[in-house]
Amino acid sequence: MNILIGTILIWAGAAWALARVNRDHRSELRTIWQISLDTFLFMLPRLLLGMLSAGFLALLLPEDYVQRFLGESSGLAGLLIASLFGALTPGGPFVAFAIGASAIKAGATLGAITAYVTAWCIYSILRIISYELPMLGAAFTRTRLLVSLPVPILLGLLAPVVM
């Protein structure tokens, strides 16, 4: 049901934006459609690859390991393991969410997946090394990482309570 509501909201937002552009910027409509098509064609192979990878990964992930390290009996250690894997996961959302979806199918808890995705968002080692350190410096990066250190664990603990 939540996916349906989200889809409806996205379509409504797109329709509203199209109406505004049609009204206020009609001369640029062709350019906007071209940019939209280019973006769609750029993202389509990545989306397909992500979905295929998720399907393959769901079959390849050993369920007994996932259930032991990220399942109901894993507790706080499972949240720490999920956070570590989230920080070490390279790539964008197509990779991270595909891994998360596969882990859910293999028996990971909602809390572990919440910790995984949150850590991937906050601590992605690749993004820190490639972008944050060179652009923002070591002092900022160190401060941000220390301040946000407990966030994946806290959200992992809260997820089962909220859902």
Image: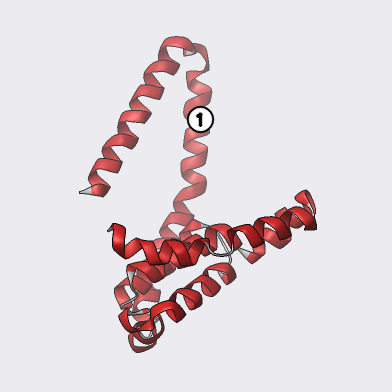
Q: For residue 7, which quarter of the picture?
A: top left
- Residue at left offset 41%, top offset 84%: 69
Q: Tell me where residue 127 appears, x and y as whole percent.
A: 65, 59
Quadrant where the C terminus sits is bottom left
Amino acid type for the residue under numbered disc 1: Gln
Secondary structure at badge 1 equals: helix
Q: Tell me where residue 110 appears, x and y as whole percent.
A: 33, 67
- Residue at left offset 23%, top offset 45%: 4
Q: For residue 126, which quarter of the picture?
A: bottom right
Of residues 118 and 142, the one drawn nearer to the viewer in this rendering: 142
Q: Hey, which residue is sitting farthest left in the picture?
A: 1
User: Which color scheme is applied?
Assistant: secondary structure
Q: How many marks?
A: 1
Q: Tell me where residue 12 appears, x and y as whole percent.
A: 31, 29
Q: Tell me where residue 70 appears, x and y as whole percent.
A: 39, 79
- Residue at left offset 49%, top offset 64%: 152
Residue designated by label 1: 34
Can the viewer see residue 52 in this picture? Answer: no
Of residues 83 and 43, the one drawn nearer to the viewer in this rendering: 83
Can the viewer see residue 82 in this picture? Answer: yes
Left or right of residue 90, residue 17 in this image? left
Relative to residue 92, is residue 76 depicted above or below? below
Left or right of residue 25, residue 57 in this image? left
Q: Residues within 10 Å of mark 1 (few under 14, many from 20)?
A: few
Relative to residue 55, is residue 159 depicted above or below? above
- Residue at left offset 71%, top offset 54%: 132
Relative to residue 11, is residue 26 depicted above or below? above
